[in-house]
Image: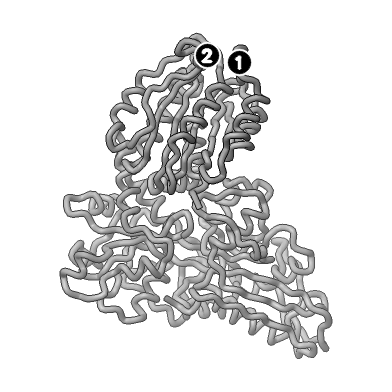
Amino acid sequence: MSAGRHRMRRSIHAATAAAAVGVLAVTAGGWFGYQQLAQPDCSGRVELSVAVAGELAPAIDAAAAEWVKGGAAVGGTCIAVNVSASDPVDVAATVAAKHGATLAGVGQASGTSVSPDVWVPDSSMWLLRLKTGGATAFEPGNGASVARSPVVVAMPEPIATRLGWPQKKFSWTELLQQVQSDKPLRTGIVEPTRDAAGLSGLLSLTAAASATGGPDAEKEKVAALRALATDRSALRPDLLARFPTASDPTTIASSLGAAALSEEDVIQYNSKKPPVPLAALYLEPAPAPLDYPYAVLPGIEPAKASAARVLYEVLTTDGFRDRLASHSLRAPNGDWGAGFDAPQGAPSPAGGVPAPPANGGGSAPAGLDPQSMDRAVSSWSIATQSGRMLAVIDVSGSMKEKVANAGNATRQQVTVEAARRGLNLFDDSWSIGLWTFSTELVGSRDHRELVAIGPLSRQRGRLEQALGSIRSSSGSTGLYDTVLAAYQQVQDNWEPGRVNSIVLFTDGKNEDRNGITQQKLLGELDKIKDPERPVQVVIIGIGGDVSKAELKSITDVTGGGAFVTEDPTKIGDIFLNAIALRKAPA
C-alpha cells in the first residue's frame, strides 16, 4: 500500500514575512482564482482543516505546503492549512452524526472526532449517501473533482491471461458468469457499506445480474451478493493480502481470484513486485470511478470558506496533475500526468470523460442514482448479516384498498409481495417467523401465528406458502395488543449474538376498543424491556390513515424505527432500509 494509506497529519504555517501572497479575485463562476502579487507580509492566521482520502493526501499536502511557502493569504490574513489523511468512512460517520443522518454499515462516530472545514473523500458516493441517509440540509460547497481513479476488477495475471486478457475486453455479465460457473472464480470485495470502490463494483455486478430479466433476475442478484460476501473484508489491505503469494498453480487456485478495487490500488500493489502481479480489467459498462470531490462543508466561517476556495484553485493547475501521477492517480478528466505508471490496457482518458476547462477541476460523475445506490447498500447489508426476526402483517379490512400506481393491486398484495422479495435476500442463517393481525382473528386474540420463528434452512418453503395464503379480513386494526404480544414472543426466545427484531406492516391506527390503551402498551413495554436482551421494533406504516406519532411512541421505547409512506409501492425499499439500519449487537 502507498504511504498515503497511513495516518498523516501536517500543519502548514504561513510565514509572517512572505515575499509573495495569494490575493483573491472573483471569477464569473462565483469561485475564486488566485495570483501571486508582491505584498510586504500578512498578519493573523486562518487555520483551514482539510480531511483527505489517504492515497490523495500526500499530493494535496505537498501542493498546500508549496502554496503556503510562497505566501498564502486571504485579504491580508495568513492561511495555515492542516491536511490529514482520513479514511472516508470515519469522516462520513462524523458528518452523519452532526447532520442527523444514518448510514448502513458505517457505525458511530468517535467521541473525539471533529468535522473538517474541507473534505476530499474518494468518491461523491459519500456525499449522496449522506443526503439519502437523512442529512437533507447537508449542502456542501463546490463538490468538483480534483483527481480520479477508475474502478477496475483486479485479477492475478495468470487467471486473467487464461480468460483472454489483455486482448479481450470484458463485461460485467461475463464476470458474473465466471462467478456463477461450475468452478466459480473466487471473488472478494471490501465491505461496500464502508468502501467506495467496493460499492461501485457491487452496483455494476448487481446491475448485470438484474439485467438478465425474467423470474430468475432476483435470484441471480442475491447469488451474486452472496458470492461476493464469501471473501469480503472490512479493510483493503486485508483483501489485497488474499491474492496469491506464490506463483505455483495450487496457491493461485486457492487464493483470491478477482476483486473490485481502484486502479491506484493495482498500481501500488504491483509496484511492490509481488510474486504474482495483478491485471487491471476495465470492465464494460464502466463502473463509477473514484472522483475525489472537493467538498467545502457547510457552516464554516467566511474567512475559512474563502481560504478553501483559493486552495481549490491550487489543486487545478497543470503542476498538480503531475503530483497526482506520482501517487498513481489521474487528473479529473481521466488523463494522467508525467510519471504515471499506467496498467496494461488502461484507457486514457478513462470512460471518455470530457476534459475540464483549462486550469479547472472536473465534475463529479453523472449518472449516480441515489435510489439504486441506497437499495444496493441495503440489500448487501441484509444478505451479509444474520438475525432473528418476526414479521407481522396487517390484514385488517382497509388492506383491501386498491393501489392505482401498482396496477390496481391491493395494499395487501403489495405488502405481501414486498415481504416475499425481502425473504429472498435472507440466507439460511436467519431465523424468521410470520404473524398476521387485525381484530379477533383467533377468538378474542388479534394476531394469528402462521409460522413460528425458526431457521430458514428448514422452513423457507413454509414461509413462502404462508405468505401466499394471506388474505384481508373484515376486521379493524388491533395494533397495541399485537405489538405487545409480538414483543413478548421475541423476547421470550431471545438469542445472543444476533439482532432480535420485529418488523410490522400496518395501514392504520389502533382501532381495537376491547384492547389495551396506548398508555398501557407503552408502560408494559417500558417495564419488560431489558438492555441485556434488546428487541428492536421496526414499524412500516402504509397510507394516509397512519399516525407516525403513534408508531414512533412505540419505537421510542423499544428501539428500532417507524417509517411511514402514503405510497404503498415504496414499502419494498423502506423494508430493505429498515432492516439494513438495525443496530448489530455490541
Q: Which mark is residue 511?
A: 1
Q: Secondary structure at mark 2?
A: strand
Q: Residue at x 47, y 11 (%)?
A: 473
Residue 382 rendering spot, x and y as whole percentages = 42, 44
Tell me whether circle 2 and circle 1 mark residues in contact (CB < 8 Å).
Answer: yes
Q: Secondary structure at mark 1?
A: loop
Question: Which of the two residues, 583 or 491, is positioned nearer the viewer here?
Answer: 491
Residue 550 rendering spot, x and y as whole percentages = 65, 27
Decide: is 249 above or below 354. below
* Residue linked to disc 2: 439
Residue 411 rendering spot, x and y as whole percentages = 49, 20
Residue 39 found in image quarter: bottom right
Q: Is residue 534 visible?
A: yes
Q: Is residue 402 visible?
A: no
Question: Which of the two residues, 414 or 582, is positioned nearer the viewer here?
Answer: 582
Question: Which of the two residues, 68 or 451, is positioned nearer the viewer here?
Answer: 451
**Which of the image's four quarters has the N terminus?**
bottom left
**Amino acid tagged 2:** Thr
Q: Residue at x 44, y 82 (%)?
A: 339
Residue 448 found in image quarter: top left
Decide: is 26 above or below 453. below
Q: Residue at x 50, y 70 (%)?
A: 331
**Amino acid tagged 1:** Glu
Question: Which of the two residues, 197 or 245, is positioned nearer the viewer here?
Answer: 245
Residue 365 rendering spot, x and y as whole percentages = 51, 56
